[in-house]
Image: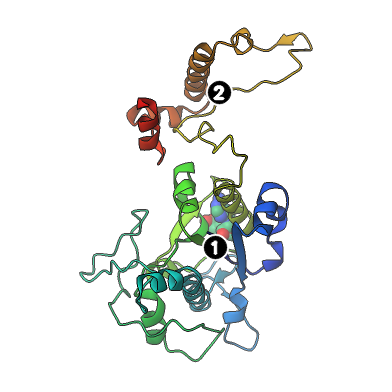
Amino acid sequence: MTFNAQILTLYPEIFPGPLGTSLAGRALSEGKWALDAINPRDFATDKHRSVDDTPAGGGAGMVLRVDVMAAAVDHAIERMTEKIGSSRAQSRGDLGNEGVSTSLDTNGEGALGSHGQRLSSNSVRPEPVAGLSSSAAPTSTTPDQVRGRAATRLPAAPILAMTPRGKPLTQARVREIATGPGVTIICGRFEGFDERLFQGRPIEEVSIGDYVLSGGEMGALVLLDACIRLLPGVMGASSSGDDESFEHGILEYPQYTRPQIWEGRIIPEVLRSGDHAKIAAWRKQRAEEDTRLRRPDLWERHRDAPDQSPSGAQEKDKDKE
Ligand code: SAH
């Protein structure tokens, strides 16, 4: 199955960029994942094709317009549904509002997304969905028609927006996304997004760290790279990344390779002992100790909930064997 990545970006030429080489590049040419860049500028409606405007309340910079961004998001939702939803609907023998989770919010409390994020409440209304025909760009649709088509449904795959105000991205979330049918990533520019975009559409706000980039594209590349390496058959057969940093909520143990002695420094004796039980114990102890010293934040969380990885349950099953 192909993992479908959709990127909303004013700079589509950035993609696939570094994801066109090495592991990710090979996986792309083998069809393990597919990339589709959507330019919000194609959804601008004025003659200058503007996508931004000055911030309400004043201040520096420009803000991405909610109407233009929402039109691009709606297009992305339909396109994703066509790619993955229609095949699901066909296999179930029904058509229409399928291929999407339909846990609609009818009580005004706001629906929860698969990640537990609170989704939009104000525009979420259960309306019948007309045939999911392909939507070309911009358009004379009324806001209600647009809402009827897209905002009343939860998307077939998660929609993430890159923003420093978002929830920090974690390996656990990356793994969840990678096991799904795909992801749509919205890249900000300038001062970022009009807040109403997140109220009106089921979008998860995500940050890649406590620093500010000039645009969301680098964040999108980071997120995609992290997902792609987890897709089946992308990494070497031997490893599914199970031992790596963050998979169990802690850092990985330190690694060594030949030469055995370098500038007078020798590889720890235990790693040369051939005693697998001792090696495993040493690695566990170093992983824990280094996490405690380097990342007290992670260590504290790990102590409270020892295995935070989504694969934690499987790990426990494996241990029993
Ligand atoms: N005014 C915003 C920053 C805008 S930076 C603020 O202070 O919060 C422009 C764009 O870069 C953002 O819209 C976002 O898409 C992207 N970006 C910047 N830093 C990011 C981060 N840490 N994580 C994810 N995206 C980021």
From the viewer's perspective, tell me whether residue 141 is left or right of residue 98.
right
Q: Position of residue 79 (x, y in %)?
A: 51, 74
Mark number displayed over residue 253: 2
From the viewer's perspective, tell me whether residue 281 is left or right of residue 308.
right
88 or 161, nearer to the observer: 88
Task: Identify which residue is drawn at 39% across, 72% down.
Answer: 89
Local crowd size for mark 2, using a 10 Å CA cut-off: few (<14), some (14–19), many (≥20): some
Query: Looking at the image, in which quadrant does ligand 1 appear?
Result: bottom right
Relative to 6, does residue 71 appear above or below in the rendering? below
Q: Is mark 1 within 8 Å of ligand 1?
A: no
Q: Residue furthest left?
A: 107
Mark 2–mark 1 distance (CA, rounded to whole Å): 33 Å
Q: Quadrant of residue 319?
A: top left
Q: SS at mark 2?
A: loop
Task: Identify which residue is drawn at 40% across, 41% down.
Answer: 310
Q: Position of residue 170 (x, y in %)?
A: 48, 44
**Quarter the C terminus occupies:** top left
Local crowd size for mark 1, using a 10 Å CA cut-off: few (<14), some (14–19), many (≥20): many
Residue type at the position of mark 2: Tyr
Q: Is residue 165 visible?
A: no
From the viewer's perspective, tell me whether residue 23 is left or right of residue 287.
right
306 or 203, nearer to the observer: 306
Mark number displayed over residue 259: none
Task: Identify which residue is drawn at 55% across, 23% down.
Answer: 253
Q: Which residue is mark 1?
A: 4
Residue type at the position of mark 1: Asn
